[in-house]
Image (spheres, rainbow, N blue to C red):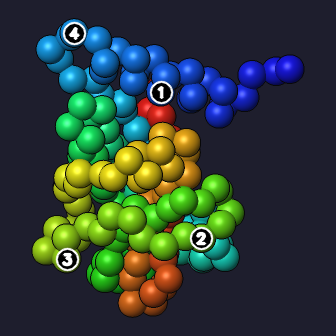
């Protein structure tokens, strides 16, 4: 059987988690990214908008830290969230919201995740979504995946 993205991702997470249980003092960090496009919305949107999310997950502190930048949206951002669990092509409820005072590009934030949220995030089941008044259910979206 040919290894899949999920197999490789699962092995990387298993390795990261096994390292985090060692006697090492340093925390392990998993680099994540999302390429934000209107075509990734469900249903797809027509927009010139685009963006990127660069995130890091600290396996010891269970914290997700992110920077999201965007450009050419139809108007001001009204909301932004990490959603899950959902694969590409499906919608899910928000899991972590971006603070309403931090919606200007670049957005920066940090959140402590629950064990279930960690499981879903590391399984590739989260996406990042930016909402505008013209596109209240989301204008650009991208699945959160390993950065490498």
Instruction: For marks 2 and 3, give the one nearer the viewer.
Output: 2
Instruction: For marks 2 and 1, give the one nearer the viewer.
Output: 1
Q: Quickly name the residue at label 4.
A: 23
- Please report whichever mark, 3 or 1, sits nearer to the chain's N-terminal start: 1
Q: Residue at x 44, y 52 (%)?
A: 116
Q: Quickly name the residue at label 2.
A: 91
Instruction: For marks 4 and 1, give the one nearer the viewer.
Output: 4
Using the image, determine if residue 140 lies above or below residue 34: below
Instruction: For marks 3 and 1, give the one nearer the viewer.
Output: 1
Q: Quickly name the residue at label 3.
A: 100
In the displayed structure, does residue 132 sit left or right of residue 36? left
- Please report whichever mark, 2 or 1, sits nearer to the chain's N-terminal start: 1
- Please report whichever mark, 3 or 4, sits nearer to the chain's N-terminal start: 4
Closest to the observer: 110 or 138? Answer: 110
User: Rounded to the nearest whole Å, what is the CA distance between mark 4 and mark 1?
Assistant: 18 Å
Using the image, determine if residue 99 lies above or below residue 27: below
Q: Residue at x 75, y 22 (%)?
A: 3
Where's residue 90, x and y in %?
65, 66
In contact (CB < 8 Å): disc 3 and disc 4: no
Q: Residue at x 65, y 33 (%)?
A: 6
Instruction: For marks 3 and 4, give the one nearer the viewer.
Output: 4
- Please report whichever mark, 4 or 2, sits nearer to the chain's N-terminal start: 4
Check disc 2 and report its element: helix, strand or loop: loop
Q: Residue furthest bottom?
A: 133
User: Rounded to the nearest whole Å, what is the CA distance between mark 2 and mark 1?
Assistant: 24 Å
Closest to the observer: 129 or 114? Answer: 114
User: Rounded to the nearest whole Å, what is the CA distance between mark 3 and mark 1?
Assistant: 31 Å
Check disc 1 and report its element: helix, strand or loop: helix
User: Rounded to the nearest whole Å, what is the CA distance between mark 3 and mark 4?
Assistant: 39 Å
| Residue density around tag 2, few if under 14, some if 14–19, many if 20 or more, within 10 Å | some
Where's residue 139, x and y in %?
48, 75
Instruction: Indicate which disc residue 13 carries.
Output: 1
């Amino acid at each position: 059987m040919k290894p899949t993205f999920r197999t490789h991702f699962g092995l990387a997470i298993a390795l990261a988690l096994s390292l985090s249980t060692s006697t090492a003092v340093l925390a392990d960090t998993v680099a994540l990214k999302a390429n934000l496009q209107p075509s990734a919305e469900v249903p797809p949107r027509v927009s010139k908008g685009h963006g990127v999310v660069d995130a890091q997950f600290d396996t010891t502190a269970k914290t997700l830290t992110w920077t999201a930048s965007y450009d050419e949206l139809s108007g001001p951002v009204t909301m932004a969230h990490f959603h899950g669990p959902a694969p590409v092509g499906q919608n899910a409820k928000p899991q972590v919201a971006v603070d309403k005072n931090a919606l200007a590009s670049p957005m920066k934030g940090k959140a402590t995740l629950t064990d279930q949220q960690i499981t879903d995030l590391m399984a590739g089941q989260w996406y990042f979504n930016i909402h505008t008044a013209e596109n209240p259910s989301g204008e650009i979206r991208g699945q959160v995946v390993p950065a490498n």
